[in-house]
Image (cartoon, rainbow, N blue to C red):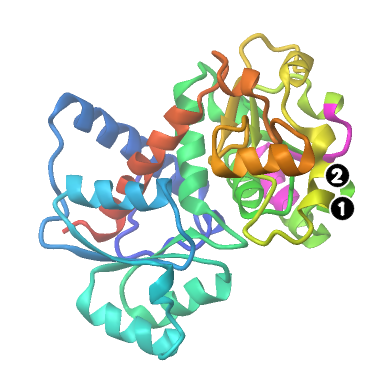
Amino acid sequence: MSVNLRGRSVLTIDEFTQDEIRFLLQLAADLKSQKRSGNEIPRLRGKNIVLLFEKESTRTRTGFEVAAYDQGAHVTYFGPSDHIGRRESIKDTARVLGRIYDAIEYRGRAQSAVAELAAHASVPVFNGLTDEAHPTLALADFLTMREFTAKPLSELTVAFLGDGRNSVARSLAVGAAKLGMDLRIVSPPIFWPATPFVEHVKSQARISGGQFTVVEHVGAGVLGADFLYTAPWLGEEEAGWAERIRLLAPFGIRTNVVEATENPHTKFMHCLPACHDRNSEVGARIAKQFGVECMEVSDAVFESKASIVFDQAENRMHTIKAILVATIAG
């Protein structure tokens, strides 16, 4: 296929065509193979990338940093304490950084912030997470699915359980629709995505021959699923934690949910971090405060042979590398 992403920003997965998504997945697979065989060719020598993080991260930050280093680029990191827009407008910051760096990554809250950076920076801008979209994660998800099934992506059935409005579910849904998958969001109605978004994803699915449904019944939603996917239930704001846990409790992925797929090859995915035990500060606090040992996934499923969450986490770096190479390589 003939695909040219040179100079492109990556703000949402919706901006890509099916061919462009498939191109990036194949490029990521090739780069991953080269890294593992020790034959990787640095294509980003002399390039400089700035990482703007209003929200902390493990996988996104390490993914961008190692991808850049592997390819010979240099990175500058700005953390939450270096909040952009405080003493200088995002527009002005974008115009400064665009003259110094070859690309900008932004991880924060407002989609409008990353869009404004892209509008004024004059260099590619990459969305590392906003409240609306998480495109680099979605690409890693699809690469991981490719690696753990013999089926074409267009023949896969994926069930996402939990908050169907979050950026993880939204980007997964749009990308799956473009690739022709059968994607189900399984969630209490209060957490269903807005009707305009649902209609948009359905329209994309019709074009590619895929399906998109939003359901409340867990059994119906997971039946036949090749992949079960979930994400953290709780955000940074503690207000409303108890109510979210109460509403989402029936949608946690336990052993019985995996069995309900009636698919012996079902794999479990999670964007991480996961609350599956009390061996973290948050996990211990949740267990003590709300009397639950786990939330979105049980420890039995998380540690099972069906779990591919760490392959998924590693693939964040490989798909980010593909984006960097495709957009700013010389």
Where is residue 192 drawn, in percent x and y?
81, 51
x and y, in percent, of residue 166 in the image: 67, 53
Q: Which residues are magenta?
A: 201-218
| Depicted 76 relative to depicted 174: above or below | below
The residue sitting at 79% across, 34% down in the picture is 251
Estimate how packed mark 1 is, as few (under 14), some (14 to 19) or many (20 or more) residues with alpha carbons within 10 Å: few
Q: Residue at x 53, y 24 (%)?
A: 152
Number of the front mark, 2 or 1: 2
Dot 1 corresponds to which residue? 190
Where does the C terminus fall, quadrant-wise?
Answer: bottom left
- Image coordinates of residue 150 in percent, x first then y, are 50, 16
Whether label 2 touches label 1, CB < 8 Å: yes
Residue 30 seen: yes
- Please state if 169 lies on the left or on the right of 30 as rendered: right
- Indicate the quadrant containing the N terminus: top left, top right, bottom left or bottom right: top left
Mark 1 residue type: Ile
- Whether residue 187 appears in this view of the structure is no
Q: Secondary structure at mark 2?
A: helix
In the picture, measured across the screen, residue 139 lies left or right of residue 132, that is left
Q: Earlier in the sequence, mark 2 or mark 1?
A: 1
* Circle 2 Cα neighbour tier, 10 Å, few/some/many (<14 / 14–19 / ≥20): some
Identify the residue under disc 2: 247
Q: Residue at x 36, y 84 (%)?
A: 93
Secondary structure found at label 1: helix
- Residue 226, image x, y percentages: 64, 21
**Residue at 36%, 81% in the rendered image:** 94
Dividing the picture into quadrants, the one containing residue 215 is: top right
Quarter of image, res 301: top right
